Amino acid sequence: MFNLRAVTKSILSRVENDTGKSIQFMRDESLPVLATLQMARNGAEFHVLRYRPSDDPLDYLIAYQAGFVLRLFENEPADRFDFAPLPDVGKRVESLVAAGQALGPVDRQMLPEFSKFVGQWALMNLRSLPIGMRIDQWIATELPDLRELQDASIALQQQQNLDLLSLRQGKLTVPTPLMGAVAAYALFADRLAGGGVYSIPYGAAGVLAQGEQLLSIWDEVPAGSTHDRKLVDLWAAAEGLTGWFNWIPYQP
Amino acid sequence: MTAKPSFFTLPVERFDLNLLPPGARQIGSEAFKQAVLEHFVAQYAPKGQQAVVTVDDVEITVLVLPADSDPLDFVMTMLQSGRIKEAVPYLETLSKAQPNSVQVLYNLGIAYSELGQYDEAIIRLKRAVQLDPMHAHAWTGIGVAYQRMGKRALALEPMQKAVEADLDDGYAQRNLGAMLLGDGRSEEALVHLRAARRALPHDAQALYGLASALEAVGGDDNVDEADELYQVVIQKFPGSQVAELSREARTKLAHKNMRAKVGGGLRPDVMMYIAGALDTFAKVGPEKSRQITIEVALKGQDGLDINDPEQKYTLASLPGKFSGMHLLSIMYAGLKALDPDMDAGVDLSAEYEAAKAMRGH
């Protein structure tokens, strides 16, 4: 077990109270990220918080993950939904990836796998970034004890997102229309950090206007969790991703 | 505001040409490259950040860090904290921005060498010595990279160049000395390893290397000096790998001396010591025997002086005073009792068998 700050423990208590299920901590040396919180499903009696042993404090990451659970359970049971990508996402991305260029046989061969990866990445951003930004705003405003950890984690996340700008396999790159969500997140991070450097690369890549549009939607939609689904749907419409996923009723 | 440096690359075709003056929109042109560079510098400067930008025909790389920091200092901090793989992209960017910086080329070369990318390392280090032929460390780096590749024949020349570039550079002297020693050129190695020790009097590897060279050259004075140096290494750097090597070297040396004194035959004193130990063990039982053996073994970790007959050692587990050879004999008998196949680090098997026969075992 690791030492968590009082504020993090109180958030986890809230999760347990709101969901009526306890949290089981599980050490996992092979976890690709530092911490994940898997909600109890299919009658399971507890949520599972997996963590990778690390010298870095996990408090912010745990609070961030808990934020998704708390927001889901702030909705009435009938209004709790899971985000479910459609299986043909890769096919839908193929035309975007291939647009405007003549692909050779090797590129064509790589196209389905590359597109599938990009499609999954785009939908993961759609699901996690707009709501995640709500959670980040909550942490920044109401949990000052986690602010420093939040800044460090956001900086790391921004650096990882930048790597996608240069992702390339042969002639295949991430299509510009799908970069809007990460550009919006960079603009949001600039606003939160009071800087302005995170969004500069997206400006150079010509995707800042898309980011600004998404951030403007984020600002206009009320911040309450009952509007989370609407927020995601509006982002999807702006990014051209409507119909790429379904909302299915949450099954505890 | 980000205080931490960041780094990104952008394929040239992804750059928004509308951000550039009309005359600079031809991708790949010098005007394009210059305008992209100016764009990023102008974007980051008002935010208190500096951008180190390189543009080639394929991609744009941008290293962003606080305006008041030296990019190389920042990378050096990374290297010094062992974050070598992480530092390489930054060094590559700096290398493109400052293609004639010997310091950048040198550090990039060493970083590649540490990562096992020896060809990449040698290219950068050769460029460094081309720009500064007196850069002893870069020459040494080339030699070490060749050595790590298993190309010893190619390693010698750059190591010699390193010494020529700076006779006072202890590392250059040490590496050349070790190389020559490995090639069996002990007399030449000794010269360089003595110079290395003068320059690096507290360097464990220089001390160990000199001791090895002295031992290899041979002669009573040299071997005595080697033994003293091994002891210095053991005392000054306990727990290090060279201390362990020094212990092994001392044991071998002592064994050689011991056998030399009796013309290679049995040592009756050792035989008597072992016989006495076997008697004691029989009397005190296995548990106490193990305790005595372990105490001697621990004492032996710092090296027992087995060439001095003076009884200068005592044990908590056994009364009396003992010479180094006496303790070694007790330890040998004890270890063999624990496990007959155990390597005791010294061969006293003939005396052991003779002692057992004498005792009727």
Image (tube, coloured by chain):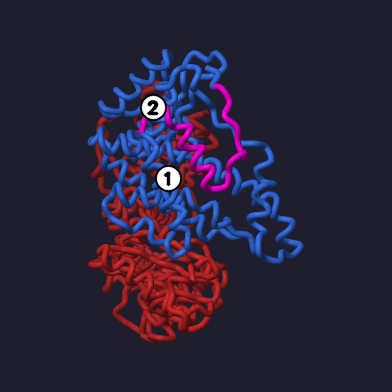
Chain colours: A blue, B red
Distance from the alpha carbon under mark 1 to that under mark 2: 23 Å
- Same chain letter for marks 1 and 2: yes
In the displayed orientation, state which residue is furthest to the right: A105
For mark 1, name the chain. Answer: B
Tag 1: Cα neighbours inside 10 Å, few (<14), some, or many (≥20)?
A: few
Q: Give, as a three-letter code, the residue at label 1.
A: Pro
Q: Is residue B359 left or right of residue B44?
A: right
Name the quadrant containing residue B103. bottom left
Residue numbers of the magenta segment: A223-249
Instruction: State the mark number for residue B268.
Output: 1
A221 or B206, which is in the foreground? A221
B65 or A251, which is in the foreground? A251
State yes or no: residue A227 in magenta: yes
Instruction: State the mark number for residue B289.
Output: 2
In the displayed orientation, state which residue is furthest to the front: A220
Instruction: State the mark number for residue B101.
Output: none
Q: Is residue A63 left or right of residue B338?
A: left
Q: Residue at x 42, y 50 (%)?
A: A184
If you read the primary sequence from the N terminus, does the residue marked by circle 1 or circle 2 appear first?
1
Percent x, y for residue A219? 36, 42
Tag 2: Cα neighbours inside 10 Å, few (<14), some, or many (≥20)?
A: many
